[in-house]
Image (cartoon, rainbow, N blue to C red):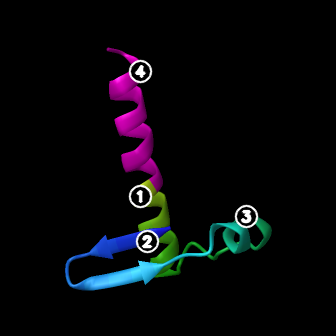
Amino acid sequence: MLIIDGNSVYEIDEDCIRTRKVPETCRTYEKIMKEQRKKQAGTEQTDGT
């Protein structure tokens, strides 16, 4: 998964995230959760059509 935040780009290994717990104090965790919420919101909008 790629997360683009302004001029920053983060590459996240999703399998690693699933097997390891990321501390909530980690800014990467915040970005991952933000991306997941965006995906869920987009999915909900397309499902309701």
- The amino acid on which the numbered mark 1 sits, given as a three-letter code, is Glu
Residue 2 - label: 2
Residue drawn at 57 percent across, 72 percent down = 24
Residue drawn at 63 percent across, 76 percent down = 23
Spatial separation of the CA atoms under disc 4 and disc 3 = 26 Å
Residue drawn at 62 percent across, 75 percent down = 13
Spatial separation of the CA atoms under disc 3 and disc 2 = 16 Å
Instruction: Tell me residue 39's x, y (percent).
Output: 42, 46
- The amino acid on which the numbered mark 4 sits, given as a three-letter code, is Asp
Spatial separation of the CA atoms under disc 4 and disc 1 = 18 Å
Instruction: Tell me residue 41's x, y (percent).
Output: 37, 37
Name the foreground residue: 2 vs 29: 2
Q: Of callouts 3 and 2, which one flags the residue occurring earlier in the amino acid sequence?
A: 2
Which residue does the numbered mark 4 point to in the structure image? Answer: 47
Which residue does the numbered mark 3 point to in the structure image? Answer: 18
Q: Main secondary structure of the magenta part?
A: helix
Residue 35 - label: 1
